[in-house]
Image: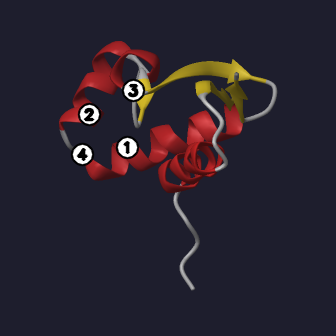
């Protein structure tokens, strides 16, 4: 089985909280996941990669599935109400 990419794993993390009936305020992303996301986006070479190269990942990807992202956290986790 092919391992899940970082974006899919983070989306799944958000979705599991939503499915449990929790309201996700934001997603904190650690440095390891940040590096993995940057690598995945650059491999795709699409418009998102161009924006990221010009302005940084925090500008290119401010949200994931409508959930705001907070970068450079100690641990990747969701913040819920």
Q: Are marks 2 and 3 in contact (CB under 8 Å)?
A: yes
At 29% from the left edge and 35% from the top edge, which residue is drawn? 49
- Nearer the observer, 80 or 77: 80
Q: Secondary structure at mark 2?
A: helix
* Outermost left residue: 47
Q: Earlier in the sequence, mark 3 or mark 4?
A: 4
* Tag 2 and tag 4, C-beta contact below 8 Å: no
Asked whether disc 1 touches disc 3, contact meaning CB atoms under 8 Å apart, the reply is yes
Q: CA distance from mark 2 to mark 1?
A: 7 Å
Q: Residue at x 23, y 29 (%)?
A: 50
Distance between the alpha carbons at the discs numbered 2 and 4: 8 Å
Image quadrant containing the C terminus: top right
The disc label shown at residue 45, or none: 4
Crowd around label 1: few <14 · some 14–19 · many ≥20 (10 Å): some
Residue closest to the eye, 25 or 69: 25
- Decide: is 20 above or below 22: below
Compared with residue 5, is residue 25 higher up or lower down, i.e. above or below?
above
Label disc, if present, on residue 48 of the rendered structure: 2
Under tag 3, what secondary structure?
loop
Q: Position of residue 71 (x, y in %)?
A: 61, 20
**Residue at 60 percent of width and 18 percent of height:** 70
Residue 77's quadrant in the figure? top right
The label number, if any, that marks residue 61 in the structure image: 3
Q: Marks 3 and 4, how far apart in space?
A: 15 Å
**Residue 41 disc label:** 1
| Between marks 3 and 4 in the image, the one whose residue lies nearer the viewer | 3
- Alpha carbon separation for disc pair 1 and 3: 10 Å
How many marks the image carries: the answer is 4
Within 10 angstroms of label 4, few (less than 14), some, or many (20 or more) residues?
few
């Amino acid at each position: 089985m092919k391992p899940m990419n970082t974006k899919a794993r983070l989306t799944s993390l958000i979705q599991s909280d939503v499915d449990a009936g929790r309201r996700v305020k934001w997603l904190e992303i650690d440095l390891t996941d940040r590096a993995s996301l940057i690598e995945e986006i650059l491999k795709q070479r699409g418009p998102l990669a161009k924006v990221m190269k010009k302005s940084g990942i925090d500008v290119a990807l401010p949200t994931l599935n409508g959930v705001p992202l907070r970068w450079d956290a100690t641990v990747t986790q969701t913040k819920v109400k």
